[in-house]
Amino acid sequence: MTTLTLAPDTPRTATEPRGRFRDLLVAEWIKLWSLRSTPWVLGLSALVIIAANLNSAKYTYDHFTAGDPASSYFQVALNDSFTLIAADILMLVAGSVGVIVMVGEYTTGMIRTTVAAVPDRRAMLVAKACVLTAVMLGYGILVAGASFGLGQAVLSGRHIGLSITHPGALRFVAAAALFAPICALIGMALGVLIRHGAATVAATVLVLFFLPSFFTDTHHWTADLSHAMPLTAWRRLAEVDMTNVFISHYPATVGGAWLTFAAWPLVSVLIATIAIHRRDL
């Protein structure tokens, strides 16, 4: 009688390399760009934002009053580089992309496959946040940089165009560029908490668009809450020349606006990381 001798089971971890964080980044990068809507949404919205800003610069060019000092057009030239309409479009697009990358995993059931492959949910979410931040930061730099360059080229025909080295210009462009990843990470965090596409988009619009209007500068505490909103912080950073700006009793500061820009994405990722680790799928 022949006795079969079975080879001892080889531990899986001994033959297969353990997944590294870099592998998670690559996986999240592939998942993001595998969505057909991603390049279309980002590309078309970038064109719309740049066109809206160019239209504003063209309006200033057509209505320029000869004889006015160029310094009086300083803030106007900056505002033409990134208008409030452009900021609204950017908020809507970036917030929606953040929602899609998270809620899409729940609606398609991909989240179960993802968690099966990567049991460490927190690492998966951090990797997703890193990829989303990188993509939306590139998107923000593209639209803000192109809008500034093209807008100032138009205004240079009236000798009121600015260079990026002009005091305050770099802050203006940086604030517009950073606004995109901030809104995207807020949308992603809400996606983890709500998990429903339509409800999450509505919540993102409520937080980014309408919540700032609930707070005024009437009282100190309401002013503080208003200044802590992402849209209010962007507006403060975009106001470089305060000559013709109404200053309330509790004005926002540039340092506080940068702090708001830093706090929202960090808190959003932290809340999303805790939620996805504790909640069932």
Image (cartoon, rainbow, N blue to C red):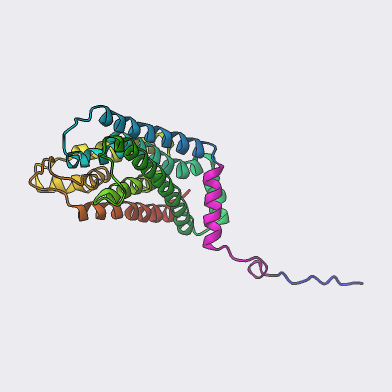
Residue displayed at 46% across by 45% down: 102
Residue 62 at x, y = what percent?
A: 27, 27
Residue 159 at x, y = what percent?
A: 26, 38
In the figure, is residue 244 to the left or right of 141? left
Residue 105 at x, y = what percent?
A: 50, 44
Residue 68 at x, y = what percent?
A: 16, 35
Residue displayed at 21% across by 41% down: 75
- Seen from the viewer's position, the closer of residues 238 and 155 is 155
The stretch in magenta equals 11-34
Residue 82 appears in the figure: no
Residue displayed at 34% across by 39% down: 153
Residue displayed at 57% across by 54% down: 116
Q: Quadrant of residue 207?
A: top left
Q: Residue furthest front?
A: 67
- Residue 72 lies, with reference to residue 127, above or below; the image says above
Check if residue 20 falls in the magenta segment: yes
- Residue 185 lies, with reference to residue 209, above or below; the image says below
Q: Main secondary structure of the magenta part?
A: helix
